[in-house]
Amino acid sequence: MTGPVAALSRRAVGALRDLAPIVGVIAFFQIVVLQQPFPNFGSVFVGLVCVVVGLTLFIQGLESGLFPLGEAIAHAFARKGSATALLAFAFCLGFGTTVAEPALIAIAAEAAEVASEAGAIAANEAARDDYAFNLRMVVALSVGVAIVIGVLRILKGWPIHRIIIGG
């Protein structure tokens, strides 16, 4: 099998491999710890298939469209020799991709729901939306800064162990 079908098949297998630990942890806690069957198993299975298909297409889109574009821009910055522009691009790329990350959006919404139920924030939609948004911004800022530090490490030739120990 060659061509686009083979590429999609490889990505689907990769998506299954990437999701397996998550599914395994959830199944373990549901069956072993909580000792309860999966509620609405059919719906859960259909949702899992949708996640695999969506993740497969998402990765395909990134690798065929956005990654080459980002690589071309990074090479253009390197040719220009502007470290400031390269660092700004690195931050914006890390920040932007993290803000748009579907898993982060879903997890931030769940965290807001839990915080609301625990009484840590008001029990209304505006408070939950604000909490989820702020959580996403903090994570995105952190990823942007981490990528800038990584690019600086490459530009300056800093050994990675100093970055890790310093962190």
Image: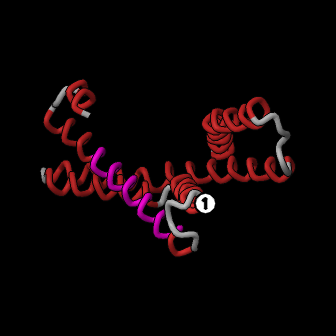
**Residue 66: quadrant of the picture:** bottom left
**Residue 14 image position (x, y, % from top left):** 62, 36
Q: Which of the image's four quarters has the C terminus?
A: top left
Amino acid bearing label 1: Glu
Residue 80 located left or right of residue 75: left
Residue closest to the far front: 119
Q: Residue at x 55, y 61 (%)?
A: 119
**Residue 134: quadrant of the picture:** bottom left
Q: Which of the image's four quarters has the N terminus?
A: top right
**Residue 59 image position (x, y, % from top left):** 55, 48
56 shown above or below 32: below
Q: Secondary structure at mark 1?
A: helix
Residue 102 seen in render: no
Residue 39 located left or right of residue 21: right
* Range shown magenta: 128-147
Q: Residue at x 23, y 42 (%)?
A: 149
Q: Residue at x 14, y 50 (%)?
A: 83
**Residue 72 image position (x, y, % from top left):** 32, 52
154 shown above or below 135: above
Name the main secondary structure of what is drawn in magenta. Answer: helix
**Residue 92 image position (x, y, % from top left):** 31, 58
**Residue 155: quadrant of the picture:** top left
Q: Residue at x 79, y 33 (%)?
A: 31
Q: Which residue is mark 1?
A: 117
